[in-house]
Image: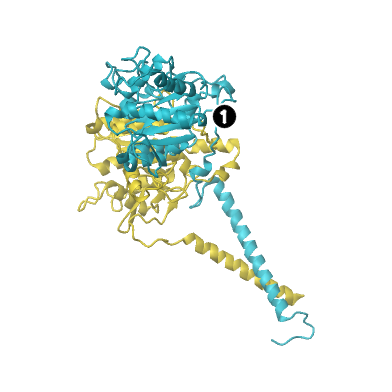
């Protein structure tokens, strides 16, 4: 009996170790594609599947809705007033909190005047201000004036992700060895990521305020560098087909591209149904976009989404 | 390996037991690892959790028709096109909204495998009304029983057929009715803009054809939409209000940005001068359930297709829910 048991136990031990080894290897997941494209992503973040949400209770759902509130940080300048006014009148109304940070004050519109001409220094100040005034909010979205965002889809992406974990998401791009999130398609930071960032701002060696003087790196790359020091890495937000949710181009531009590359399936080959951002749209296009996203639809096509986001108060173009 | 006399195992049995142990060990370890992953998912998710593709989450719950449910709302679409536009325009209609019609006919001057129907009319602006007359006569002769409503559209129009069906579902196709973007001038009861597309009920189609048969309607002008409107008036076909319950337009003779972009209060711009119902500029111009936009082709057609049928804000509760009032929530305000 013992000898039989012995074989069995040896087998079990081997099996267990084998499984552990496999799972450890699985989490490493080295880069799959050969680095031909500059957009190769080691880190992907995808949203929850339908079924995961089904098992949550109402209380848990409400907790999620609160947890997923978004604070929008919109960097503006008086010289592009019409973009500023458009962001104010369109997508930013769907943020739980939207604060405009300007390089200088203007009587026309309300903003936090950072009185700072340097783009990187201004971004730092804005992020610090947003962090210090976060209140209950745990997700932060940084946008340019030319960004158009669909905040509900941002919430869907980060739903049930813990903001006390460091997340730095968007359209992840690679520049040499540095992986960074592109500015114009919006940058998403969890509370933990922002906290670490604000902390590393104090380190003049790792994260200098006036930027790396010799060659002026763009703000998004500087941000990535600083975050990297804190152990936070850029991740590409995408859907289950691998389609990026954060776009550095406009809808028109992406459709035009798709007409060339997927002429037989233009729309399906283009963009995600739950895309979060587009960039490079004119103010008029953004107004049309509000209609296209929040109103225009075919009668009878109903979705049974598991979470409900109400329309903002005091608004009528959505 | 020597066999002990008191050992009851052979080499095969021992290997079997070993293998069983291996599997048990593997599965137990796996089970324990999975348990850990599950509790993590509840709060914060490890990387690589799948998002359902929108097509899966999209349960297309096609609402049954409002109003008389025994009525059908079959729509025959005929698209006024020509050989030189097939590749650049009509093809894309065929890829998108064309197939949402119950029946679609691409009317041209040349028969092809597109497929296009040939009418004995030459191309050109001055022949538009001849083409329209011949098209409706052709449809009346060959396809009258296949539909209840008959839509005419240009090859540079974007149409949302579901929304047209919704608008038509409360109307009786046996009544002489015609719908579109109503214009005031030239015809006393008004006429429907050709560019925005217009729809004739079955009875209206019968009367149109009868009008030409009997000489009550003639080709008195090359201006297709106005001339057809005049024939409708002569044959006592009623122009119907196609706006939604909030008075917002559904048919549009120009692209979206002409209407939706906010404007300061101002006198009517030239493209709104003909409107019968007082036009509204800015977001209140247009219904959520838009039926058409015109001067749309190429990239713009697919952009509208994407915005209408694909891109959406997850979980968003639309402000305009015309059916909700009739269901339960009396406490909900618009």
Q: Circle 1: is it few (<14), some (14-19), or many (20+) Cα within 10 Å?
A: few
Residue A93 at x, y = what percent?
A: 39, 30
| Quadrant hosting residue A96 | top left
Q: Quadrant of the N terminus of chain A?
A: bottom right
Regarding residue A69, the answer to whether it shows in the image is no
Residue A202 at x, y = what percent?
A: 32, 47
Colour in which chain B is drawn: cyan
Q: Nearer the viewer, residue A253 or A30?
A: A253
Kindly identify the residue that appears in the image at 30 percent across and 50 percent down.
Answer: A221
Apparent side of residue B172 relative to residue A210 in the rendered image (left or right)? right
Q: Nearer the viewer, residue A236 or B303?
A: B303
Q: Which residue is mark 1?
A: B64
- Chain coloured yellow here: A
Q: Quadrant of the C terminus of chain A?
A: top left
Regarding residue A180, the answer to whether it shows in the image is yes
The way the protein has been coloured in the rendering is by chain
Furthest residue toward left: A214
Apparent side of residue A294 relative to residue A305 in the rendered image (left or right)? left
| Quadrant hosting residue B161 | top left
Residue A102 at x, y = what percent?
A: 27, 34
Element on which disc 1 rests: loop
Kindly identify the residue that appears in the image at 27 percent across and 44 percent down.
Answer: A120
Q: Chain of mark 1?
A: B
């Amino acid at each position: 009996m013992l000898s039989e048991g012995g074989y069995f136990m040896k087998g079990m031990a081997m099996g267990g170790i084998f499984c552990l080894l496999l799972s450890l290897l699985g989490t490493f997941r080295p880069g799959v594609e050969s680095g031909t494209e500059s957009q190769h992503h080691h880190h992907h973040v995808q949203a929850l599947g339908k079924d995961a949400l089904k098992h949550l209770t109402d209380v848990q759902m409400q907790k999620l809705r609160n947890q997923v509130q978004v604070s929008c940080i919109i960097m503006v300048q008086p010289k592009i007033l019409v973009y500023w006014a458009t962001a104010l009148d369109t997508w930013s109304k769907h943020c739980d909190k939207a604060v405009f940070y300007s390089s200088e004050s203007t009587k026309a519109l309300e903003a936090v005047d950072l009185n700072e001409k340097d783009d990187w220094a201004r971004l730092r100040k804005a992020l610090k201000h947003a962090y210090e005034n976060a209140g209950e909010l745990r997700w932060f979205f940084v946008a340019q004036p030319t960004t158009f965002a669909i905040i509900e889809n941002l919430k869907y992406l980060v739903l049930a992700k813990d903001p006390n974990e460091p997340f730095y998401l968007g359209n992840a791009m690679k520049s040499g060895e540095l992986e960074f999130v592109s500015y114009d398609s919006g940058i998403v930071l969890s509370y933990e990521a922002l906290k670490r960032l604000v902390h590393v701002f104090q380190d003049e060696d790792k994260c200098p305020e006036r930027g790396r003087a010799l060659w002026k790196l763009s703000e998004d790359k500087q941000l990535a560098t600083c975050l990297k020091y804190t152990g936070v890495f850029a991740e590409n937000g995408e859907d289950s087909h691998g389609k990026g949710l954060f776009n550095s181009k406009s809808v028109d531009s992406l459709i035009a591209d798709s007409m060339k590359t997927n002429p037989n399936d233009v729309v399906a080959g283009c963009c995600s149904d739950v895309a979060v951002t587009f960039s490079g749209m004119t103010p008029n296009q953004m107004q049309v976009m509000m209609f296209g996203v929040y109103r225009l639809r075919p009668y009878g096509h109903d979705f049974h989404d598991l979470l409900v986001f109400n329309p903002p108060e005091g608004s009528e173009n959505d | 390996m020597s066999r002990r006399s008191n050992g009851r195992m052979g080499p095969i049995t021992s290997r079997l037991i070993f293998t069983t142990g291996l599997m048990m060990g593997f599965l137990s370890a796996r089970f324990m690892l999975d348990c850990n992953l599950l509790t993590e998912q509840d709060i914060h998710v490890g990387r690589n959790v799948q998002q359902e593709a929108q097509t899966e989450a999209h349960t297309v719950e096609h609402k049954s028709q409002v109003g008389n449910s025994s009525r059908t709302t079959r729509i025959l679409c005929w698209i006024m096109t020509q050989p030189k536009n097939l590749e650049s325009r009509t093809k894309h209609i065929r890829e998108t909204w064309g197939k949402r019609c119950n029946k679609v006919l691409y009317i041209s001057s040349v028969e092809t495998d597109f497929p296009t129907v040939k009418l004995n009319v030459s191309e050109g602006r001055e022949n538009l009304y001849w083409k329209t007359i011949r098209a409706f006569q052709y449809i009346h002769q060959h396809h009258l029983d296949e539909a209840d409503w008959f839509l005419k559209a240009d090859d540079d129009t974007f149409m949302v057929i579901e929304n047209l069906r919704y608008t038509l579902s409360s109307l009786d196709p046996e009544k002489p009715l015609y719908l579109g973007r109503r214009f005031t001038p030239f015809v006393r009861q008004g006429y429907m803009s050709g560019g925005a597309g217009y729809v004739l009920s079955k009875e209206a189609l019968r009367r149109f054809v009868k009008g030409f048969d009997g000489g009550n309607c003639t080709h008195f002008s090359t201006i297709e939409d106005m001339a057809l409107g005049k024939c409708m008036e002569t044959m006592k076909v009623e122009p119907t209000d196609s706006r939604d319950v909030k008075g917002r337009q559904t048919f549009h003779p120009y692209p979206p940005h002409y209407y939706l972009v906010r404007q300061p209060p101002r006198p009517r711009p030239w493209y709104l001068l003909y409107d019968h119902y007082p036009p509204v500029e800015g977001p209140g111009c247009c219904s959520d359930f838009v039926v058409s936009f015109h001067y749309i082709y190429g990239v713009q057609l697919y952009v509208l297709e994407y915005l209408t049928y694909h891109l959406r804000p997850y979980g968003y509760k639309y402000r305009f829910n015309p059916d909700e009032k009739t269901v339960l929530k009396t406490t909900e305000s618009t």
